[in-house]
Image (tube, rainbow, N blue to C red):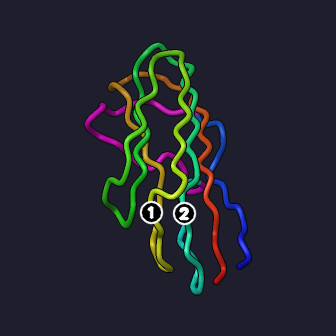
Amino acid sequence: MLSSPRFLQGVFNFEGKGLDRPFLLDAALTYVVPDGVVAQPVYFRGGNASGELVSVVLMRDGQPMRYFPIGAKNHTHVALRVVEDLEAGTGMELHVAAPAGTTVTLIVDLGLVEVHP
């Protein structure tokens, strides 16, 4: 079996709309599992430079799959290896939520592996 790594990552600035109002941060943080491939999330890393709690929400086909809260001026690393397989056509997006009006600089890095059977 062949495998290929894929990453959704970057440094982003945004203004929070409320912890209960996650939104897609950037189009670069979207991914669709290609045909003929099974993907697995491997890890999530995130850093929050703001003085407020921020939450990153991993969305699967428009529904929340995992929440990654990141404390004020803090970071997180979550191993996801072998949590579950994502079949071809599955859509993934990283959404963010922060208190309304909070200016945030966030670093995100979601690592996935595509397995080619």
Residue 12 or residue 47, whichever sits in front:
47
Task: Give the SS element for disc 2.
Answer: strand
* Image position, residue 115 (x, y; %): 64, 73
Q: Percent from the top left, x then y, of residue 101? A: 37, 23
The residue at the far left in this view is 20
Mark 1, secondary structure of its residue: loop
- Considering only order in the chain, which callout, 1 or 2, is on the residue closer to the N terminus? 2
Q: Residue 37: horizontal and vertical position, in percent? A: 59, 80
Dot 2: few (<14), some (14–19), or many (≥20) neighbours within 10 Å?
A: many
Tell me which amino acid carries mark 2. Gln
Q: Given the image, on which type of amino acid does mark 1 rest?
A: Glu
Residue at image coords 38%, 48%: 66
Tag shown at residue 26: none
Q: Are marks 2 and 1 in contact (CB under 8 Å)?
A: yes
How packed mark 1 is, by other alpha carbons closer than 10 Å (few <14, some 14-19, many 20 or more), is: few
Which of 1/94 is in front?
Answer: 1
Q: Is residue 61 left or right of residue 26?
A: left
Q: What count of labels does the image hold?
A: 2
User: In the rendered image, which quarter is residue 84 located in?
Assistant: bottom left
For image coordinates 38% across by 29% down, the residue present is 98
Span of residues in magenta:
13-28
Q: Residue at x 53, y 15 (%)?
A: 73
The answer to if 79 sits in the magenta stretch is no
Quadrant (top left/top right/bottom left/bottom right) for the N terminus:
bottom right
In-front residue for pair 69/79: 79
- Residue 36 position, x and y percent, is 59, 86
x 50%, y 80%: residue:
88
Name the residue that disc number 1 marks: 84
The residues tagged by marks 2 and 1 sit, at their Cα atoms, a distance apart of: 6 Å
In the image, residue 35 sits, relative to residue 23, either above or below, namely below
State the residue position of label 2: 40
**Residue 51 vertical placement versus 107 (above, below):** above
